[in-house]
Image (cartoon, rainbow, N blue to C red):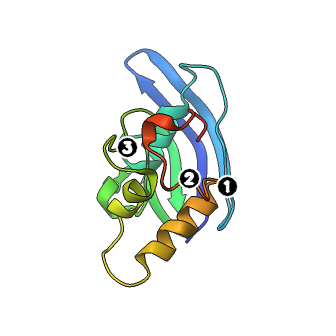
Amino acid sequence: MATVDIRGVEKYFGAAHIIRGVDISIEDGQFAVLVGPSGCGKSTLLRMLAGLEEISKGEIRIGDRVVSGPGVHVPPERRRIGMVFQDWALFPHLDVARNVAYGLPRGPGRDERVAEALAMVGLAGLGDRMPGTLSGGQ
């Protein structure tokens, strides 16, 4: 894992200035939360970090590597960043554990990795639940 540095990041959609001068540093092993009202740019910032949206100004680094900046846009598949959208991101016919396992390689240790991932995000013991039974925060 690596430190994520977002420096002076801005985003325009036409004349609309959506993101203004964001500076965030997330150290290896830290969790970060974006909180704000609907439409304030939280999802746009995450999309820029993941490489799904190009920045208009500033720089994003993952470790010592610039992934977005003047003349630089590393595509999403080369960033090693995952993003799960809040809505419509889970297979409704698979339980929570099978949704998490879907993105992991098959083989020994997979169940342990799923359990670790669920524990990491505060969902330990909820792997057998269906997505429709979880709250928005879960």
- Type of residue at label 1? Phe
Q: In whole angstroms, how far apart are the C-alphas of marks 2 and 1?
A: 21 Å
The type of residue carrying mark 3 is Leu
Q: Secondary structure at mark 3?
A: loop
Circle 3 crowding by C-alpha within 10 Å: few under 14, some 14–19, many from 20: some
Q: Which mark is residue 90?
A: 3
Q: Which residue is mark 2?
A: 126
Q: Is 102 situated above or below 42?
A: below
For residue 31, the mark is: 1
- Name the residue: 35% across, 43% down: 52
Residues under labels 1 and 3: Cα distance? 22 Å
Which of disc 3 and disc 1 is earlier in sequence?
1
Q: Nearer the viewer, mark 2 or mark 1?
A: 2
Q: Is residue 91 left or right of residue 40?
A: left
Q: Is residue 124 above or below residue 138?
A: below
Q: Earlier in the sequence, mark 2 or mark 3?
A: 3
Q: Residue furthest front?
A: 128
Q: Residues within 10 Å of mark 1 (few under 14, many from 20)?
A: few
Judge whether residue 56 can be spotted in this image: no
Report which quarter residue 136 is drawn in.
top right
Marks 2 and 3 in Cβ contact (< 8 Å): no
The quadrant in which residue 23 appears is: top right
In which quadrant is the N terminus drawn?
bottom right
SS type, badge 2: loop
Query: Residue at the spot x=67%, y=32% of the render?
Result: 35
Residue 128 horizontal/vertical position (percent): 48, 54
Per the model, the C-alpha gap separating discs 2 and 3 is 14 Å
Q: Is residue 129 above or below residue 43?
A: below
